[in-house]
Amino acid sequence: MMQTSILIYRLFDTANSIELAKAETLLATGSHVSRLRLTRVSPKAIVFKDPPVTVLLTPQQIPVGAKIFPAELRARIYELGVISIIIRINLPPEFAYQDLIDLASAIDHIPESIFLSTLEAVLAAIRPAVNGERAPVVEEDLVIYYFREWRQGWDAVPLLLGEKEPVSPETRRETLANRFSYASDFTILGWDKAIVYEPTGSPDIPDLLEFANSQFLILRYYDHLLNQEIDKMYDAIAEAEQRAIYRRLGEYRRIRRQLLELMADITSITSEIENSLRVTEDVFYARVYTTYLRILRIHDWTASIDQRVEVIQRSYNLLTEEVVTSRSELMELAVIILITLEIVLSLLQIT
């Protein structure tokens, strides 16, 4: 017999921002609403700048492979525009570990329509609190196998890889490399799957992993946005170069204003991401959280954004130089025209 749950997350980037206090008020009628709070540490040990809002939704029957399971549904709403849809399947006590391994390969194939319809229902309920709503461009998924009982001899590798075939010793070592334990508990981290054994039933580790995924998703979105904006910038500059000098300068000034606003927005967003969660005291949670960020390669995405911002900064500087140079040339031309006109007028007076 097992005491096991499967937590299936799908995170969507939906808006520029969401006013959480307003969303909380909108959802409070008829729904159980709360703010994220870790249960096993003091509030000062891990500080959320603006804890996301969690709302309990109507339970559903979820098909997984050939089976159908009753499931709890929750949505978690983040200030920076991310909405996470969470399906929790509490497996029946008679469910064997081998049954869970057989089920693991089907977990990734839960119908997308369940997540999308739930997302739309949540958005409809909180729309007055949503700023700059957009169709999701990027999304992230995560599966956590949550155990309150763990037996010697159970193999974690098939769950983390989602496949039953035997693997090499090297693959096994790599899969189990990111294992953390505080007391009798343990957590094993993978890219999009994790195993958490927590006899107390605390949801802290799953909540931390979900929060890290929300940060990762936001960085992915803004990296995508910057890539698009750089392409637009090059197209706009190429189009401006085909125009007469005076109109070209006007276009350059417009492009410069847009680039300046974009750089300010990106700087503000990346700062908010970095400050959205601070681990100040709990060393164990800090290790789990920072290791998971490393697995997600979040620093690579931050570096990619920094590189794109540098491209925009260089383009801004070049456009500024072009505007200044062209303005000087126009002034020089105006001076030459005035001098020429004065000479012509003088000659006309002499004659």
Image (cartoon, rainbow, N blue to C red):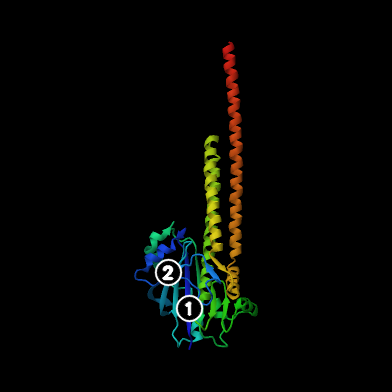
Density class for disc 1 (Cα within 10 Å; few <14, some 14-19, many ≥20) is many
| Label of residue 6 in the image | 1
Q: Name, please, the residue furthest toward the left.
A: 30
Looking at marks 2 and 1 on the same chain, the residue that comes earlier in the sequence is marked by 1
Give the Cα distance between marks 2 and 1: 16 Å
Out of 128 and 141, give the one closest to the viewer: 128
Density class for disc 2 (Cα within 10 Å; few <14, some 14-19, many ≥20) is many
Percent position of residue 36, x then y: 47, 71
Out of 172 and 77, give the one closest to the viewer: 77
Total numbered labels: 2
Say whether marks 2 and 1 touch (CB < 8 Å). Answer: no
Element type where label 2 sits in the image: helix
In this orientation, does residue 30 appear? yes
Q: Name, please, the residue furthest toward the right.
A: 170
Percent position of residue 231, x then y: 54, 51
Percent position of residue 351, x then y: 58, 10
Element type where label 1 sits in the image: strand
Image-quadrant location for residue 91? bottom left
Out of 25 and 262, give the one closest to the viewer: 25
Residue drawn at the location 61% of the way across and 52% of the way down: 310
Image-quadrant location for residue 275? bottom right
Residue kind at label 2, given as amino acid type: Phe
Residue kind at label 1, given as amino acid type: Ile
Percent position of residue 323, x then y: 58, 39
| Label of residue 234 in the image | none
Q: Which residue is mark 2?
A: 115
In this orientation, does residue 232 appear? no
